[in-house]
Image (cartoon, grey):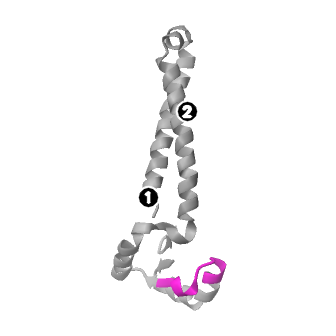
Amino acid sequence: ATVFADAALADAISAEADAVSTLGRIDPAEFKVVEAGQEASETAKAEAGNAVRLVVEDGLEALLPMAALVDAEKERARLTKQEKTLVAAIEKLETRLNSPGFADKAPAAVVAKAEGELREQQEQLLAVRDSLKALP
């Protein structure tokens, strides 16, 4: 993990680096404190690819590596299962909406609700697929 802080905070965090890394369950060898500025900007760009950026407050940010936060294989399995569930639900809703009996006979409110559910599930599916692509 890398912490970006203004000068005063950087000194305080560096002085307590052992405590911070212990409380954050971070390997002390992987914990860095960088004073905010040009070097911090370059470091952030270099590390941002597989990290989550956490803005704590003005003048204090942290980059947390995804590898340390998520077991990629477990997350991939969970997301793949969720993707299959969403695909099945979308297919079911599309079949119902495309059925002449449903579209012609159902009240407009019921059809609108089903269309809303379909859009919501399609958005969720896109988010799940984006998350799968982002995994290391």
87 over 9 or under it: above or below: above
126 over 56 or under it: above or below: above
Of the image marks 1 and 2, the number of the one nearer the N terminus: 2
52 over 40 or under it: above or below: above
Question: Could you tell me which secondary element the residue under label 1 belongs to?
Answer: helix
Q: Does residue 130 appear to the left or right of 96 in the view shown?
A: left
Between 7 and 133, which is closer to the camera in this rendering?
Answer: 133
From which residue to which does the magenta span run? 21-33
Res 105 → quadrant: top right
Question: Could you tell me which secondary element the residue under label 2 belongs to?
Answer: helix
- Residue 92's label in the rendered image is none
Mark 1 surroundings: few (<14), some (14-19) or many (≥20) residues within 10 A = few
Dots 1, 2 in contact, CB < 8 A: no
- Residue 134's label in the rendered image is 1
Between 87 and 48, which is closer to the camera in this rendering?
Answer: 87
Q: Amino acid at mark 2?
A: Ala
Q: Is residue 39 magenta?
A: no
- Residue 89's label in the rendered image is 2
Residue 4 percent across, percent down from the top left: 46, 78
- The residue at the point 46 percent across, 60 percent down is 135
113 over 129 or under it: above or below: above
- The residue at the point 51 percent across, 70 percent down is 67
Residue 59 percent across, percent down from the top left: 47, 75
Q: Is residue 23 magenta?
A: yes
Mark 2 surroundings: few (<14), some (14-19) or many (≥20) residues within 10 A = some
Q: Name the residue furthest top.
A: 105
- The residue at the point 53 percent across, 26 percent down is 93
Between 9 and 22, which is closer to the camera in this rendering?
Answer: 22
